[in-house]
Image: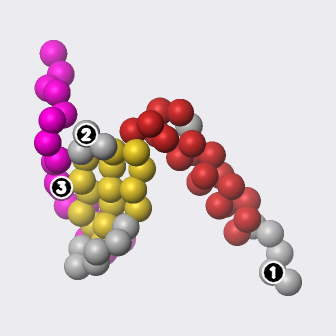
């Protein structure tokens, strides 16, 4: 049986030598570089509906466009 997520859980994650804090809460997931205030947040609704994946694909396609 799974445990209900009723309060935030924080964990540290090291990616390529940079430390991030990952917070999993009833509202969603937030990833912030350690020592910073702003980061990336995704609500569970966006995650489940696929909006987060759509936004990531749109961002990647815009970055692939030639610069003018």
Depicted 63 relative to depicted 8: above or below? below
Q: Position of residue 63 (x, y in %)?
A: 70, 69
| Mark 1 vs 3, N-terminal side | 3
Q: Nearer the viewer, mark 2 or mark 1?
A: 2
Depicted 10 relative to depicted 64: above or below? above
Q: Does the segment drawn in magenta span residue 60?
A: no
Depicted 47 relative to depicted 42: above or below? above
Label 2, label 1: how far apart the Cα atoms are:
40 Å
User: Mark 1 packing: few (<14 Cα in 10 Å), some, or many (20+)?
Assistant: few
Query: In the visual, does 66 lie left or right of 12?
Result: right
Return the mark for residue 67.
Answer: 1
Color encoding of the figure: secondary structure
Specify the quadrant of the image occupied by residue 4: top left
Q: Nearer the viewer, mark 2 or mark 3?
A: 2
Do the residues under discs 2 and 3 have CB atoms within 8 angstroms?
no
Specify the quadrant of the image occupied by residue 36: bottom left
User: Mark 3 packing: few (<14 Cα in 10 Å), some, or many (20+)?
Assistant: few
Q: Which residue is mark 3?
A: 11
Q: Which residue is mark 2?
A: 26
Q: Residue at x 17, y 54 (%)?
A: 10
Q: Residue at x 39, y 39 (%)?
A: 44
Q: Position of residue 22 (x, y in %)?
A: 26, 57
Q: Secondary structure at mark 3?
A: strand
Q: What segment carries the magenta color?
A: 1-19
Q: Residue at x 73, y 59 (%)?
A: 61
| Mark 2 vs 3, N-terminal side | 3
């Amino acid at each position: 049986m799974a445990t209900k997520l009723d309060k935030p859980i924080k964990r540290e994650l090291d990616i390529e030598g940079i430390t991030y804090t990952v917070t999993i809460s009833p509202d969603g997931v937030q990833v912030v570089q350690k020592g910073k205030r702003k980061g990336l947040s995704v609500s569970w609704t966006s995650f489940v509906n696929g909006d987060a994946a759509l936004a990531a694909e749109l961002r990647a396609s815009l970055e692939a466009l030639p610069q003018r």
